[in-house]
Image (tube, helix red, strand yellow):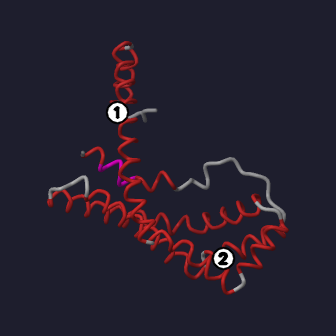
Amino acid sequence: MKKFALALVTAPALFIANPLAAEPAATPDPTAIAHAREIVETIMPPDRQSTVMAEMTRAMTDQMRSAMADQFTDAGLRQIVDAHLTKVIERIDPVTQRYLPVLMEAMIQAYAREFSVAELIEVSRFAKTPAGRQYFSRSTALMADPAVAAANRTYFAEAQAASLASQNDLRAAIMAYLQKHPEVARKMAEQAKAGVPQP
């Protein structure tokens, strides 16, 4: 149960791609970039980006809390997990704020690569209409919709249970390998003692 909780509270990391990890791609056409920027800044206006990201994080965390409530019936354990989630958010927030400009620029680049200039012009034109502005500005808020929240709670619980099963299988396979190859186990122990990072 403890391992399940630790896996669950780190779930958001699985859904956030590292924008610096991939190889740099070809720079899209400047016209495409301009239209893509209009679209992205409609979805997440620059003056509201921090707020929108905070709202999304809070919505996801609240859904995770609800999912964990089904796993921990003891009030004391729930309090510990709840406090841990609050602390995780506090630690993640400055990282999110630091990467926000990079993430937004990466999203602009992705739109410009994924869609043609003609398509971007159409989407941008729609984004400037009242309906388009409402659609894009509220798209991120849908994470907090009751139906989405309910689906996410179930998803988080089952996905993490499946992940835990896979981790147990991996751990068992590694232990079996190390038993057959004690020299590898000794080398790893020596490296750990010397402070060498393990693969």
Q: Nearer the viewer, residue 63 or 176?
A: 63
Q: Residue at x 35, y 19 (%)?
A: 176
> Does the segment drawn in magenta span residue 87?
no
For the residue labelled by badge 1, is the local secondary structure a helix, a strand or a loop?
helix
- Image quadrant of residue 132? bottom right
For label 1, the residue is: 168
Q: Which mark is residue 41?
A: 2
Quadrant of the rendering where the N terminus is positioned: top left
Task: Classify 10 Å Cα crowding around label 1: few (below 14), some (14-19), many (20 and above).
Answer: few
Q: Nearer the viewer, mark 2 or mark 1?
A: 1
Residue 102 in the image: state x and y as whole percent: 62, 64
Residue 197 in the image: state x and y as whole percent: 43, 35
Seen from this angle, which residue lies furthest front?
147
Q: Which residues are magenta?
A: 5-10
Where residue 190 appears, as percent x and y from the top left, is 35, 24
Residue 115: mark: none
Q: Quadrant of residue 175?
A: top left
| Magenta stretch: dominant secondary structure | helix
Between 59 and 149, the one nearer to me in the picture:
149
Q: Residue at x 25, y 46 (%)?
A: 2
Amino acid identity at mark 2: Glu
Is 162 left or right of 25, judged from the image as shown? left
